[in-house]
Image (cartoon, grey):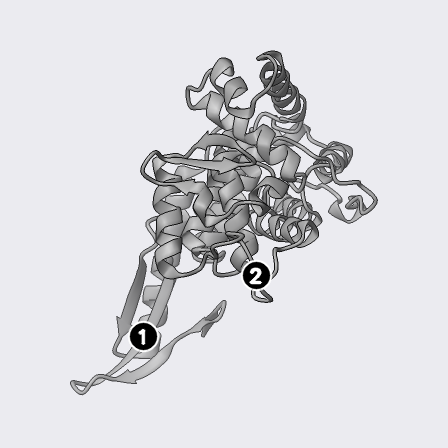
Amino acid sequence: MQKGTKKIRHVNTGTGDYYVYDLDEDAFGKRKRLYGKTEAELKEKIEQAEKERELVLASQRPQSKKLSDCVRFYFKSSIGKINASDIKRLLTLFENTVKDSDIDRNIDELTADDIQRFLDKSSEIYHRQSVMELRGHLQKVFELYEQDIDFDSIRINDDAQPTSCIITPSEYEEVIEYCLLDNCTKCGQNERLFLFCLFTGVSFTQAKKLNLEDLDFENKTFKIEKTVYPLSDKACGWLQEQILAGTLNEKPLFINGNNVSPSLQSIQSTVDAITKHLGLPKGLTSKTITKSYIVWRIQNGASAEELTKYFGYKDKFKVQKIYDEYKVRTELFR
């Protein structure tokens, strides 16, 4: 008897023969193991456990049929069937796109045309793979709720052009934490340079000019072309760890395995790969990192005057204009 890739196994523990079966993970990520002296006994236990699981899920089914609530219930019912890390990533993707969007209403009222317009809009901001995932899991949500939507008629717009956009503060922090947890092992020096830009808001071109002597850990600053910028405690700690590990060079600070500074194109490819992996917008560029940094800092209490001084702008209206651009994007898209 099989369920997915799992099956009943016959084992000998030294004290006797048993039949064993692993249930799906529960909501806490724990997996219960069932035992039986005979295969028939174990099958009965499996059947009972599955009935209990269905009853628990039925009791947790939301009364609301708002699409975002239906999506959360779908992922809750998928625990053990979809990898936990994938569920976390997909929930973030759906929270950032579906929640409070034009289609976040009663699932009974939605049509294939509504879904098509939503995916077309998403294609202007998100990677094709992310939009494909949106479509695939939306189809399963509608199937779970027995809604007859013809998803075969819904197409992904392959001609959509990438749109540079400012990512949200939560998305910004997600990229930082991903690079830190990954310890920049997947993309090496490109990822380290990218992370430095996220920490500081400077452009790729500026970061490429940085030398080891430009870092001042005592005063928590760094210098690029005679301009001195402050370094956060987190950025200082990370840079010092990298120096101790021998992953950074002296002059310039960021050079790749071929002993040359990474090209802007290769850095952008790294950024695209990371945002694609995380299911985040595809429009993150050197320019929009600076804009996203400004929004991130404002949301964390920094003033327009402080950021104007940080970047050397003539007046605070440029900072305000960037924040207004972000508000327009979020209000129109969400």
Q: Nearer the viewer, residue 160 or 76?
A: 160
Q: Nearer the viewer, residue 25 or 18?
A: 25
Q: Residue furthest left?
A: 15
User: Can residue 165 be seen from the camera position used here?
Assistant: yes
Query: Could you tell me the amino acid type at mark 2?
Result: Asn
Image label count: 2
Q: Position of residue 225 (x, y in %)?
A: 56, 36
Q: Position of residue 179 (x, y in %)?
A: 47, 50
Query: Could you tell me the amino acid type at mark 1?
Result: Val
Mark 2 = which residue?
Answer: 256
Q: Position of residue 123 (x, y in %)?
A: 73, 40
| Residue positioned 50% across, 45% down in the render | 195
- Quarter of the image with the C terminus is top right
Q: Is the C-beta separation of discs 1 and 2 under 8 Å?
A: no
Q: Which mark is residue 259?
A: none
- Quarter of the image with the N terminus is bottom left
Q: Nearer the viewer, residue 299 or 42?
A: 299
Under circle 1, the secondary element is strand
Task: For label 1, count other residues whose C-alpha is less than 10 Å away and answer few (under 14), some (14-19) or many (20+).
Answer: many
Mark 1 = which residue?
Answer: 20
Q: Position of residue 107 (x, y in %)?
A: 62, 32
User: Can residue 51 be seen from the camera position used here?
Assistant: no
CA gap, disc 1 and disc 2: 51 Å
Task: For label 2, count other residues whose C-alpha is less than 10 Å away and answer few (under 14), some (14-19) or many (20+).
Answer: some
| Residue positioned 59% across, 14% down in the render | 320
Under circle 2, the secondary element is loop
